[in-house]
Amino acid sequence: MKRALIITALVLASAVSLAAAQRGAAGAAPAAAAPAKGPVPRMADGHPDLSGVWWRGSDVGGRPAPGTPGALGAGPRGQQGPPPPSYTDLYQLAAKEQFKKLGDKDDPTLKCIPTSFGTLNVSMFGVGAVGQIVQTPKQVVLLTETFHSFKIIPTDGRPHRDDVPPAWRGDSVGRWDGDTLVVDTKNFSDVPWMFAEGRVSFHSDALHIVERYRRVDSNTLEIEATVEDPKVLTAPWTVPKQTLYLAPFDQIMELNCSGFETQSLMDAAAKENYGKK
Amino acid sequence: MKRKIFGVVVTAIVLLAVTMPALAHHSFTAAFDPEKPITVKGVITKVRLENPHSWFFLEVKDANGKVETWAFEAGTPSGMIRNGYKPDLIKAGTEVTIKGLRARDASQTMGMLQQLVTADGKVYGLFGPQEAR
């Protein structure tokens, strides 16, 4: 029972799409195409301007914009493949044992704790599928729609802060390597998981993530990342390169979390051991 | 008197459902049972397009004329709106058939919405309007 909302949503979306094809759709707005492609916009200092709302071409359960894979990647008739790659194959022996004991009910996002990375392997998305970048000459700010979180990334050469406690989203600093923004994040709390949707993905406080952001044209942002955690992983994990697209809207929206209201439903689920036999 | 008690019960259920929950953005299967699909047909009484997840409420009449209020959890408002859903797209009084997954707590008439079909054949999914891909 580790199927997640994202997985469920896309499977359902494909089933519903099929039904819609047979019965007539409910006047859905056509998926908006991405803006026309152009050169990489630049700041006055010459660095690429990464600002914009970025996604994979759709929301979870939404219809992918033309030429994009959609939130999880779409196959024929909206079918989708396996969940995004994870790093749990690299768990050390003790972590593998711990992994076996955990499941849906232990997912910190049930308590509205954000992910330390991102369910779709994009840290800017966090628990969801869309994020916004606001860039200034000395800072790049990543805004995350789902659970409303942010990362402020100073790019003026300062070191990591040494006056803050471990944080759910870590502490980030950035630097420019040519046209690539390199973001170094550490000082994570060990409470969040890397991913949401019940996918067991705990880490330690030694988690260290290095991301490389490159805007390849006006509409396309590529992100590469390396994840290290010497306390629980046997080797660093190289995250598959993520390609994001400029969304056809310029503001993310509110998507908060208020887990206390779900308590009665979750308590009832717990009594049934979450459906496990 | 019976009618009054019934009204109180229905109100209580609705209030419970309204103040209840929207799941965080986590696995739905922790709270809804994929092995308990359910289909109900009834009349929409209220749609709450709200964070973190939206809810559809409907009154369902059984063969004996008994009315139950059901609540189905749907997608995030941001995702639904970007997918073409508008606040008044489905109004109170609309006759619908909803397919979903029942809450693991079977004492509550609640579920996760998978598909909503209006009497005139329009199809909605977890995130609002759907189209063939």
Image: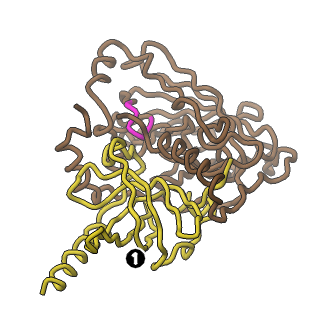
Residue A179 position within the rendered picture, expressed as x and y whole percent measured from the top left:
77, 35
Q: Which residue lies furthest to the right in this view?
A: A38
Residue linked to disc 1: B45
Instruction: Please give left or right for residue B109 compared with residue B39 in the image.
Output: left
Q: Is residue A180 above or below residue A258?
A: above
Residue A270 position within the rendered picture, expressed as x and y whole percent measured from the top left:
21, 43
Q: Name the foreground residue: B99 vs A276.
A: B99
Which chain shows up in brown? A
Structure colour scheme: by chain
Q: Residues within 10 Å of mark 1 (few under 14, many from 20)?
A: some
Residue for point 28% across, 74% down: B65
Residue A88 position within the rendered picture, expressed as x and y whole percent measured from the top left:
43, 22
- Type of amino acid at the residue the image marks with label 1: Thr
Q: Name the foreground residue: B69 vs A72.
A: B69
Residue B8 appears anywhere in the view? yes
The colour applied to the residues of chain B in this rendering is: yellow
Quarter occupied by the N terminus of chain A: top left
Residue B86 position within the rendered picture, expressed as x and y whole percent measured from the top left:
58, 71
Residue A72: quadrant of the picture: top right
Instruction: Please give left or right for residue B51 compared with residue A136 in the image.
Output: left
Residue for point 52% across, 20% down: A237
Range drawn in magenta: A195-200
Q: Residue furthest left?
A: B1
Residue for point 42% across, 49% down: B25
Quarter occupied by the C terminus of chain A: top left
